Amino acid sequence: MSLSRTGRRREKRDGRFGTVLVVTGAGILAVVALAVLLGPLFTAWGPNEIDPSAPTLAEPGGAHLFGTDVNGMDVWSRLLYAGRVDLGIAIAAVAVAVVLGSVLGVVAGYFGGWLDDVLMRLTDIFQAFPTFILALAVAALLGSGPVNLTVAIALVNAPAYARLVRAEVRAIRDLTYVDAARTSGASTIGLLWRHVLPNSLTPVRVIAPLNCGWAMLTLAGLSFLGLGIPVPDAEWGAMISLGTGDVVAGRWWTSVPPGIALLVCVLGFSLLGEGLQERADRVRR
Amino acid sequence: MRVLRFVVRRLLQLIPVLLGVVVLTFLLVRVLPGDPIRTILGPNATAADEAAAGARFGLDRPLWQQFTDYLSGLVTGDFGTSIQSGQSVGGEMALRIGPTMELVVLAVAIAMVIATVVGLWSARHANRAGDHGIRVLALVGNSMPEFWLGLVLILVGYAGLGWFPAPSGRVDPDTDLTPITGADALDALLTGNMPALTSSLWHLALPVLTLVIVIVAPLLRSVRASALEVLRSEPYAAAEAHGLPGRLLRRGYLVRAALVRLPSLAALVFGFSIGSTVLVEYVYSWQGFGQWALRGLLYRDYPVVQASVLVIAFCYVVVFLIADVVHAMLDPRVRI
Amino acid sequence: MADSPHFSRRSILQLGGVGAFLLATGACASGSKNNPSSSSSGGAKSSTLKIAVSSYISSWDQDFVGFDLTALMLYKNVFPYMIDYGVKTVGGSKILDTENIMPTFAESFEPDAEQKVWTLKLRKGVKFPSGNELKAADVKWSKDRAFAAQANVAGIYRTIGLTKPEQVVVVDDYTVEFHQEFPSALTRQIQAISLYVFDSVEAKKHATDADPWAKEWFAKNPPTGGYFNVTKATQGQEIELTANDAYPGPDPAKTKTIRISVVPAAANQRLQLQAGDIDIALGANPRDIRDLKKTSGVAVLSAASNSQVAIQMSTTTAPFDDVNVRKALAYATPYEQIIKNVYGGDARPTKSVVPLDMPGYSEKGYPYTYDIDKAKAALAASGRTSISSELVFQTDNDEQQQIAVLVQSEARKAGIELKLTPLDPATLADRRGKKNIPLQITSGQLWVNDVEYMLATSFVQGANLNYANYTNPKIEQIYQQSHTTVDTSARNQLWAQVQDIMAEDVPWVVICQPNFNLPVRESVAGWVQPMDGLARLRYLGTSA
């Protein structure tokens, strides 16, 4: 804590930035979530519906806010429907990864020994696997589709959480309050669930939003390469891939809006995560 | 000494991890639907032709034997023969790793420089408009899908302004560059070929810029955070109060301390970049490692997939080892 | 004091250094490269042609290689082929004349009276770049190798009755005889594809006991001795071809140097063509071509083509094993809309399974038009009001994707619900092998412009392109008969019967024949449309 008045004023100002980031990030995400959940109810076309009256690659304007793409489908409607897919998969994948990773991390960190070694080597193997190949493998084995992609992305992200949680658990397992709970007769599971786990999740809370953004970019990248959500289904990365050839011709409305949508969403997650980290750092100081 | 023991123990543990990766890849790629042999046969091939082609690559032998053959090859450095091209996988990989390394190394280096300079400045002007602006800008860059950014940069830099070369090829062929490592700028330097050097640097500009914009944010954050810690620490305040000149203060206290966490983070970033250059390579037609691995995957070219996964996994594992070691050295709560 | 707002000298140098480096490379490079907005190409020699292709060559070994159209096109130009098609002019543009085969590297290729023994006479004194002379022993070694590889050539040789290496006989140093089991009308065209020759003397130096056919050496080393020699072929960089001065025959290559660069993205090819960085874009897609037609400095060469786009329906998998269901899909396909939306009108509607320009084409071969009512009626005739199935196409293939979407949307109106499934090359090949694809979009061109070849590859039982698993004993019988029927009018009568049967059985939905369009710089001249889809680079020249 600073001793001078200007120092204290400066620290108050410092603190506000973190909150600003969190609020902005959460705000952006709230707007996007609202748009993609409710928006499609108001659009005239479905995500894979061709408008027979409009030409393909029609310019924005008139009935089509962002024009039509190469198949004659309305870009704006697809943008909104795709948002559901992208947001849904990103959040679900990270949720699954957090759960899976935390459980593994707690077990490995608390019990230590050979169990720790084995689990960590297993997560190392999965973490060492290149994302795209693992995702493709899972998708190919289970069939492509949103659920399977969620599983694939979750599998790729879980190891990081396992390591994070394990590190925290190892740091606190010998701390006094855990010792106290243990000596007062708490069962192992109860101990883990009530004392160890909640206190190990601090870094997770900050990383998870950032991870959501990264998961969304992974999904978009996979779809862009043709390994994720298959064209012509609506997903922002797939939409960008569909319009790649047209951007060069000046037909920007098929590829640029989905890219901007991705940017905005991921930025929202990043601001949220950055803000949370900022506030966490403040508390630590 | 404890650190050394830790490193050696982790290095030994590296081997089963890599072995695990090899086994997993070997099985995974054969379990995937898709037939690599039929993709190399013409439309007039019969079942006998298919069997003959399969035998040529050892695919008719029992699985365990294929695995032991592969493993014994690996030990001697033989990665097998590509089904698609009939050439040695190791040879193909050697040609393609250079270009990708060139891209990633340059991008990470430039990003580190920018992160250092801007991060230190940002920390010294913490929580003023400039600092906020820089942090948000870095985040925006980090939030962009890199393939989309690549497309936009090509549109603006090549099609629009015409300052940068077409997104195909890494060097102008008129310069007659002899490939040594595959990294064209390096080869040009090694052979003293000046026109090739400028040509390859110019071709590198846009792809490197794409990668830099995307990866600078986490590096910036790390430098800034470390710098802030130093700036707000008591020793620094004391030195400042004692009247040390600014430059000495910064050089002596700030720069070194702020850079302490950067190498491990850069290693992490480097590791991740290796695995995901495929998107940037695709957009710029870079013909590097990522594109080669992807093509191998699409065609189920078993040796190619196995080799590329192994190399990427090796990079990841080494990088995590470095990160773990540095973390363990710095965080007093963790006992090795 | 401490918080001085200006940078320290070192940081300025660092930042400035980065900026300076960018500026320096930009300045140097812009000095050494032409401004892209000017219309001249960036090459130093005006007798250099720059061509962009979409995928890289997987290998230089034509016998043991992956089936790769770009590679096959290159092989056509760098291997010495003994014979090739002639050129004729149709409607103002030049095309390869499949009915007129001329010897190129060889002196002559003629049959005996029964047309079972074909004699290849070589020219004397033709040398490979290694200095070795091209002799009959090279031809024999090359064809023995083809038989041993059991790949493309061995496969098509079967259709003309060549199945064993013993049937290729060396008579003397400059004469080789091919003893076919039966006379065939396809021989000249099949041999035009197959008579490429390796430098066997050179190859034997690199053969080992484990590798008697020098596979390793051939995979890495480009062949030589064709119309062009490969002078540079580093993976990941451009391939450079130089005209072969030792070519002995008529019509030598018109351009001294050709550079081939691999540009997978069609959009990038278009950009480079517009800027003049390349002269020919071999991988542009229809939309880019439509735009390029309006660009100054670029010309689009168009020619009618025998490339067919079709949906092959599996006659052994439900529900398409019922001919009425197949007819329903045939009536539900929006042919005109596909030609308009996907090809911009630049495709010919077709009325038969036999391609339009193939001898024997008859308009009665495919009497189905877009008519949803008839589609519903046909479906009802099969006893169903709605069915659901799967439409498979190649991932990464824009045209097929657009066609699939249109077909799905219209078929739905007739009660046919289709799930779209894009597949990567390996999975596609695998499922084709297992023959479990109910519907798949295929596009391609036959190498031999003859219905017998079409039957051999696509419609007889077990044929490799017969993804529809179609069999019909009458077709088999006609096919057998065609082996030995050499007279043209008799063959045409057989083909008329074939098309009548096909119209009834409708194993394919034949969508259209897209025209061939090649965007080139205006200075490029001499294009000859290849009937087999493999460009003959020797006719091209640039007048820049």
Image (cartoon, grey):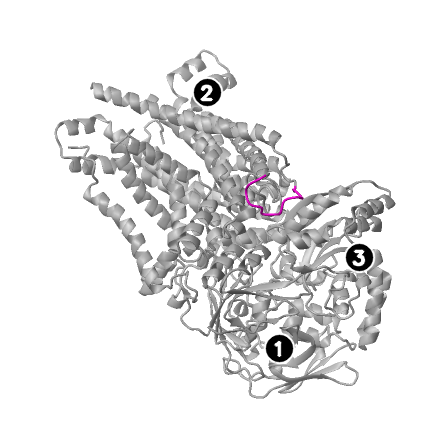
Q: Residue at x 17, y 26 (%)?
A: B238
Write the start and end of the magenta stretch as one range. Answer: A50-62
Q: Residues within 10 Å of mark 2 (few under 14, many from 20)?
A: few
- Numbered disc 2: what chain? A
Residue A210, above or below C275: above
Residue beneath disc 1: C141
Labels 3 and 1: the sequence-earlier one: 1
Q: Quadrant of residue C250?
A: bottom right
The image shows residue B36 at horizontal and vertical percentages of 62, 55
The majority secondary structure of the magenta stretch comes to loop
Check disc 3 and give the amino acid type: Tyr
- Numbered disc 1: what chain? C
Check disc 2 and give the amino acid type: Pro
Residue B156, above or below C365: above
Q: Nearer the viewer, residue A173 or A28?
A: A28
Residue B187, above or below C209: above
Residue beneath disc 3: C470
Q: Residues within 10 Å of mark 1 (few under 14, many from 20)?
A: many
Determine if residue C446 is in view: yes
Q: Is residue C73 left or right of residue B152?
A: right
Check disc 1 and give the amino acid type: Trp
Q: Nearer the viewer, residue B161 or C67?
A: B161
Q: Which mark is residue A198?
A: 2
